[in-house]
Structures are given as C-alpha cells and as structure tokens.
Amino acid sequence: MTDQTPALTTGDLVRVQGLVKTFPVRSAWGRRRGVVRAVDGIDLTIRRGETLALVGESGSGKSTLGRCILQMDEPTSGTVTYDGVELTSLPHARRAPFHRSMQVIFQDPFSSLNPHRTALQNVMEPLAVLTPDADTRAQAVEALAAVGIDGDAIHRRPRAFSGGQRQRIVIARAIAVRPDFVVCDEPLSALDMSIQAQVTHLLLRLQRELQLTYLFISHDLSVVREIADRTAVMNRGRIVELGPTAEVFASPQHAYTRHLLDAALSTDPGTARRRLERISARPDPVGLEPDGTTLAEVSPGHFVLR
C-alpha cells in the first residue's frame, strides 16, 4: 500500500471520493454527441457493519454507483478505497483478492442464475473461482442451508423454485465466499409483497450472524425506513441528502427528498405514481434539481446539498 492511499476513519470500510462515471451519447449514425454523467462527483463513506441505503428515482445513478464501487464499471475519475486499499489505482490482476470480499445481489434472481445448473452447482461456481482451496461443496451446502434451501432441493434447477426461493439461492451464492461487503441492488423489487418481508428478514439475520456491511440500493422507501442505519438520496448522479435514516425520513432538508418521500410513501398507489411521474418530468421542477456544490452538515451526521 502506498503513502498516497487515503486513510479511512476508524470503522469505515468503503470510501468514495470525487467519483465520476460518464457514458457516451451517440446519434443514430453512431457519432458521439456528448456524454451523460451517470455519477457526478460522489463523496461517500460506508461504515463497517452498517446498512447504508441508496435511494432515488430510476435513472438517478444508484446502480451505476454500486457497480463502480465493486469495480464492475471502471470509474471515469475519482477513487474507491476499500478497507484501506485504493482499488481504482490497482492493476486489474491485483484486484482479484477483493472479489471475494465484495459481493452483489442483483434485482432479478432468475437471470442471476445459470438455468442449466442446480442450486448447489450455482453456489459452488463462484467458490471454485474465488476460494479454490476450500471444500467448495461443503461451503455451498452450508450457505444454502443458511438461507433455507436444503435436502433434495439443492439438486433442483432454478426453474423448479419460486421467485423468493431463487433469490435465496442468489443470496447463498453471495455469502458462500464469506464476504465482508454486499451490494444489494434492488433485491426485493422482483418479489411479491409477502416474499419481500421474508427475504428482508433473511438479509437482516445474515447481516447479524456474518457481520456483513450492506449497500442497499432500493426505490422501496418503506423497506429502507425499517432496515437502513443511514440513507443517501441520489438525484441525477449526485447525493442531495445523507443522514441517519430516522432523521432523513422525519425531517428531510432537500426539496427533492421531501417530494420523493411524499410520493413514494403515499398510501394511494395512483397518487404515488402520479407524484413520481411529476418528479421525473423534464425540465426539472423548480427546487428539485441538484444545483448545489457542497454537502453541508445541518445536524450531527445529517448532510444536505447546498
């Protein structure tokens, strides 16, 4: 580790500094017409053992930020430091040890699994790559049992399971390699309401038992309110508000946060949909666009873009 590696605050596992990710915009003829800043200068820390929720409307940059942290997408600029090591400055070959420690749970469990392999084989696959010296079968069986898939069920293929069971297999595959940090990218949105509660409780139990750190990306603010220690609100690639979840929900300071909470937590689905459509409309409603430059601390640990 070099002297240039940023030092983390005690208890911080992940630090993101000045992170930018752009994508080219091309015409119908393939000519480059500019860029879209999907992530626009993000500064963020994730504390060891916490659940940090990342919320915002579709297209706000949440998943792109998560993928950049995991190094699945190469940031355009800025740094990602994990457990004291600046990943963005490492050659790709030297990032391999961190692939085991950093895992992801995607939104669609069916597309996350190989349909031609059994549940056991799906979980063994990353183990064989990331922990070749381990007893991969025993670890896979143990991980599946931890999420409630055992007995003859481990030899079934994904199509034989319900959506909730398939997501349990995806979770088993993530925890089988014994990571420290898991990005949960909309892990509940493809599930029925009753199954969402079961999977949420499973994630919380595993966090306690395995001492995991979560980045929980979601548009479901009712779930976020229940499980997240802190919440970061994203709008157009920037964090506009960040703070303890209870405080952000009880006393939102940014206009975008207030409108997002008002829309997403409405008891009437039709009203919620119309309000979210109004927020997403272009041009931006006055006061909702992320026009500030600095996250200012308005109360201990509670920041808003000013």
Image: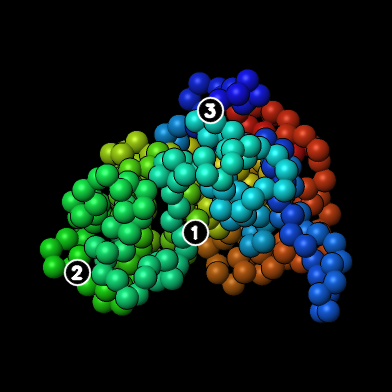
284 to 31, vertically: above or below: above
> If you read the primary sequence from the N terminus, does the residue marked by circle 3 or circle 2 appear first?
3
> If you read the primary sequence from the N terminus, does the residue marked by circle 2 or circle 1 appear first?
2
The image quadrant of residue 247 is: top right
151 to 10, vertically: above or below: below
- The Cα–Cα distance between marks 2 and 1, rounded to whole angstroms, is 27 Å
Secondary element under disc 1, as helix, strand or loop, is loop
| Amino acid beneath label 1 | Glu
Q: How is the image coloured?
A: rainbow
Q: Is residue 76 left or right of residue 287?
A: left
Which residue corresponds to mark 1? 186
Percent x, y of residue 49: 42, 34
| Amino acid beneath label 2 | His
Secondary element under disc 2, as helix, strand or loop, is helix
Q: Which mark is residue 84?
A: 3
Location of the C terminus (image quadrant): top right
Percent x, y of residue 228: 47, 43
Identify the residue at horizontal 24%, vertical 63% (top origin): 120
> If you read the primary sequence from the N terminus, does the residue marked by circle 1 or circle 3 appear first?
3
Which residue corresponds to mark 2? 155
Q: Is residue 51 left or right of residue 166?
A: right
Q: Residues within 10 Å of mark 3 (few under 14, many from 20)?
A: some
Identify the residue at horizontal 52%, vertical 44% (top origin): 93
